[in-house]
Amino acid sequence: MKTRLSWFTTTLSVACVAGAALIVAFTLGVYTWPAFALSAAIGLIVGWPLGVWASKRIKRRDPDWPPHPAD
C-alpha cells in the first residue's frame, strides 16, 4: 500500500495546532463551543500548509528521494 507522507504530516500538524489553540482558550477561561470551533478552524488554516511544508522539507533533505523502482 502506498501512502503519501503529507497525509501523516498534515494530520499531525493540524491536531497539534488545534490542540495548542484549544489549550490557549482553556487557559483564558473560555469553555464554550465557539472556542472548539475556532480552535479547529485555526488548526486547519495553519496546520494544513505546515504539514505540506514539513513533508516537502523531509523529501528535500532525503538523499534517497525519489525512491528508485525495484529492478
Image: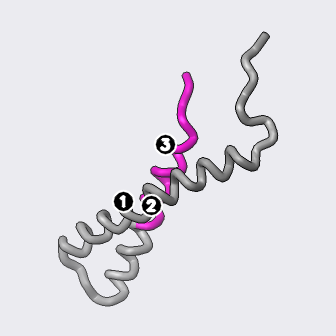
Secondary structure state at the residue bearing disc 2? helix
Within the image, what quadrant is residue 20 found in?
bottom left
Q: Are marks 2 and 1 in contact (CB under 8 Å)?
A: yes
In the image, residue 54 lies at what x, y percent?
A: 59, 54
Q: Which residue is mark 1?
A: 44
Secondary structure state at the residue bearing disc 1? helix
Between the residue at mark 2 and the residue at mark 1, the CA separation in whole angstroms equals 5 Å
In the image, residue 50 lies at what x, y percent?
A: 51, 59
Q: Nearer the viewer, residue 62 or 11?
A: 62
Secondary structure state at the residue bearing disc 3? helix
In the image, residue 35 lies at what x, y percent?
A: 25, 75
The part of the chain drawn in magenta is 1-17
Q: Is residue 42 magenta?
A: no
8 to the left or right of 71:
left
Q: Could you tell me which residue is drawn at 36 percent across and 59 percent down?
A: 44
Mark number displayed over residue 7 = 3
Q: Nearer the viewer, residue 55 or 18?
A: 55
Three-letter code for the amino acid on which mark 2 is drawn: Gly
Three-letter code for the amino acid on which mark 1 is drawn: Leu
Between the residue at mark 3 and the residue at mark 2, the CA separation in whole angstroms equals 12 Å
Q: Could you tell me which residue is drawn at 55 percent across and 22 percent down?
A: 1
Relative to 28, does residue 4 appear above or below in the rendering?
above
Between the residue at mark 1 and the residue at mark 3, the CA separation in whole angstroms equals 13 Å
Q: Which residue is mark 2?
A: 47
